[in-house]
Amino acid sequence: MSRQTSTLILSAADRETIERHLEAGYPDEACGVMIGRELPGANGSNPTRTEVVRLVLADNAREDSRHNRYVIPPEAVLAAEIAARAEGLGFTCDVGIAERMERLILTGVGGLLTGFGVSWGLGAALWLLSVLTLITIGQRLIHVRRQETRVGTPS
């Protein structure tokens, strides 16, 4: 029985983005999702290579032990999955109220408040982030549905 290996293809720009995300989160754990597509092997054999086509950098939602544990909020995983599925069908899905910069600012403000003695600062920021992410999911679903309706794709 032969063992099949798989190769992950990551661009230099994506590698640099991941490194910056890890450095920004240090000393805490950092996390995210890589969205990829399988590339066919030689002569139409089974796919053995996966090319990363998009990075979704997530905030560490864990409130304790952030230095050696992380939690990706479920709504962030859902938003990434919706975007990946939409893009896989040829639709754009780059809309929403809680984009990357907004999430970073909100998490940073929550961390600063906690650092200045406001014990509920980070928790409140993460709750607000969850609500904004759920709104973003709804916006993305509506956006893709409108694209689907315009091109006449059957539901």
Image (tube, grey):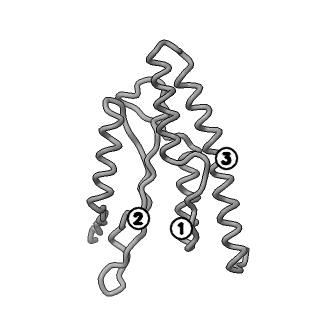
The residue beneath circle 2 is: 53
Say which residue appears at 53% left-offset and 54% top-offset.
80
Quadrant holding the C terminus: bottom right
Please say if 14 is above or below 72: below
Say which residue appears at 59% left-offset and 26% top-offset.
124
Helix, strand or loop at label 3? It is helix
**Contact, mark 1 vs mark 2 (Cβ under 8 Å):** yes
Residue reaching furthest to the bottom: 43
**Contact, mark 2 vs mark 3 (Cβ under 8 Å):** no
Helix, strand or loop at label 1? It is helix
The residue beneath circle 3 is: 135
Q: Is residue 131 left or right of residue 47?
A: right
Between discs 3 and 1, the one toward the N terminus: 1
In the image, residue 34 lies at what x, y percent?
A: 41, 56
Q: Is residue 67 left or right of residue 125?
A: left
Mark 3 and mark 1: Cα distance apart in space: 19 Å
Bin the neighbour count of mark 2 within 10 Å (Cα to Cα): few under 14, some 14-19, many 20 and up: some
Give the amino acid at mark 2. Val
Give the amino acid at mark 1. Glu
Quadrant holding the N terminus: bottom left
Q: Which mark is residue 87?
A: 1
Please say if 78 is above or below 121: below
Helix, strand or loop at label 2? It is strand
Between discs 2 and 3, the one toward the N terminus: 2
